[in-house]
Amino acid sequence: MERTFLMVKPDGVQRGVIGDIVARFERKGFQLVGAKLMQVSRELAEQHYAEHKERPFFGELVEFITSGPVFAMVWEGENVIATARQMMGKTNPQEALPGTIRGDFGLTVGKNIIHGSDSKESAAREIQLFFKEEELVSYSKLM
Ligand code: CMP
């Protein structure tokens, strides 16, 4: 079954929307298989955002993601990578539609509430970066 990595960023944690975000993915029918509230180190942030290393906003990105606790999660379900990105809305909250997470809660592209893997390859990479195998569970969904 497909898995994705989702992370409520420091602004989402501060705004108190972890519960709302988790509820959206639960209601949709996805399954939570790993989660933790954690402080991202500079080293982990640089690894996570390695593909953006040359971008002018890289420093800002690392500063922000290490500025306070994040809520890291692994979700499982059919087509969860693409569907979660639809539910998150566009990267820039000003372009994200109402009804999406960023459309409902976000204001600026730097502080856009949530991160989600954009492909199977990034999902695999990000999950192993943030979670040890034994921190993830596997269980059958009864409904
Ligand atoms: P995320 O999905 O975490 O992946 C990369 C992040 O870079 C993205 O969300 C945005 O928060 C951030 N980002 C993208 N463009 C800009 C920008 N122009 N200025 C600052 N941050 C940006």
Image: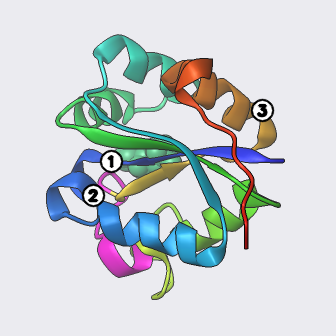
**Residue at (33% x, 51% y) in the render:** 110
Q: Which mark is residue 121?
A: 3
Question: Which of marks 1 and 3 precedes in the sequence?
Answer: 1
Question: Which of marks 3 and 2 precedes in the sequence?
Answer: 2
User: Closer to the camera, 73 or 116?
Assistant: 73
Label 1 belongs to which residue?
Answer: 9
Tell me whether circle 1 and circle 2 mark residues in contact (CB < 8 Å): yes
Residue 122, relative to residue 117: is it above or below? above
Tell me whether circle 2 and circle 3 mark residues in contact (CB < 8 Å): no
Q: Amino acid at mark 3?
A: Glu
Instruction: Specify the farthest residue to the top.
Output: 43
Q: Which mark is residue 66?
A: none
Q: Position of residue 57 (x, y in %)?
A: 37, 36
- Magenta span includes 98: no
Q: Amino acid at mark 2?
A: Gly
Q: Position of residue 130 (x, y in %)?
A: 49, 25
Does residue 54 appear in this view?
no
What main secondary structure does the magenta stretch of the protein show?
Answer: loop
The magenta segment is 102-111
